[in-house]
Amino acid sequence: MGVHIAVYRGTEVEVLYKREPGKMRHGGNCLVKAGDVVRLGTEAIHAITADGSGQSHAIHVYEGPLTQIDRSLFDWTTGAKVEFSMENFHAMARRKTSMTEFS
């Protein structure tokens, strides 16, 4: 399902990934600044973080019933699908300083 992301304070970094057999590959970063709106397509896999040391504030508007679809998380190392739950989401959270996408 596609999503529109509108940032209204700060800058949000969309960390984009591509799924490949046996792994996830970093596909680039997209900066979304206050006042900007971007759309990610139905196949997008992304993580978000704020740019710099400040916070970012954004609204994510999904193009459908988000609570009624099968959502997945992806293992950072293997790229394997992991069932989406808030427990798994929090367990898999990473700090920006540990992300190779920013080194």
Image (cartoon, rainbow, N blue to C red):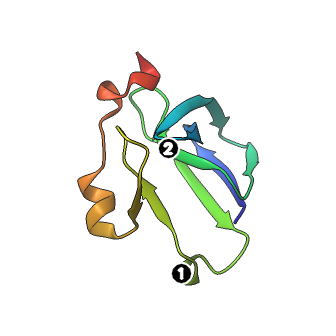
Q: Residue at x 54, y 30 (%)?
A: 26
Q: Residue at x 37, y 48 (%)?
A: 75
Q: Position of residue 9 (x, y in %)?
A: 57, 44
Can you see residue 17?
Answer: yes
Secondary structure found at label 2: strand
Quarter where residue 94 is shown: top left
Amino acid at pointer 2: Ile
Label 2, on which residue? 48
Q: Position of residue 58 (x, y in %)?
A: 58, 53
Secondary structure found at label 1: helix
Q: How many C-alpha atoms fall within 10 Å of the one at disc 2: few (<14), some, or many (≥20)?
A: some
Q: Residue at x 72, y 61 (%)?
A: 2
Task: In the rendered view, tell whether residue 81 sits above or below residue 49.
Answer: below
Quarter where residue 16 is shown: top right
In the image: residue 81, left or right of residue 92: right
Nearest the camera: 52 or 95? 95
Foreground mark, 1 or 2, reads 1
Q: Residue furthest front?
A: 21
Nearest the camera: 83 or 36? 83
Label 1, on which residue? 67
Amino acid at pointer 1: Thr
Dot 1 or dot 2: first in sequence order is: 2
Can you see residue 56?
Answer: no
Query: How many badges with numbers are in the image?
Result: 2
Give the quadrant of the N terminus.
bottom right
Q: Cα distance, mark 1 to mark 2?
A: 19 Å
Q: Position of residue 88 (x, y in %)?
A: 29, 62
Task: In the rendered view, tell whether residue 36 sits above or below residue 26.
Answer: below
Q: Position of residue 17 (x, y in %)?
A: 57, 38
Q: Which mark is residue 21?
A: none
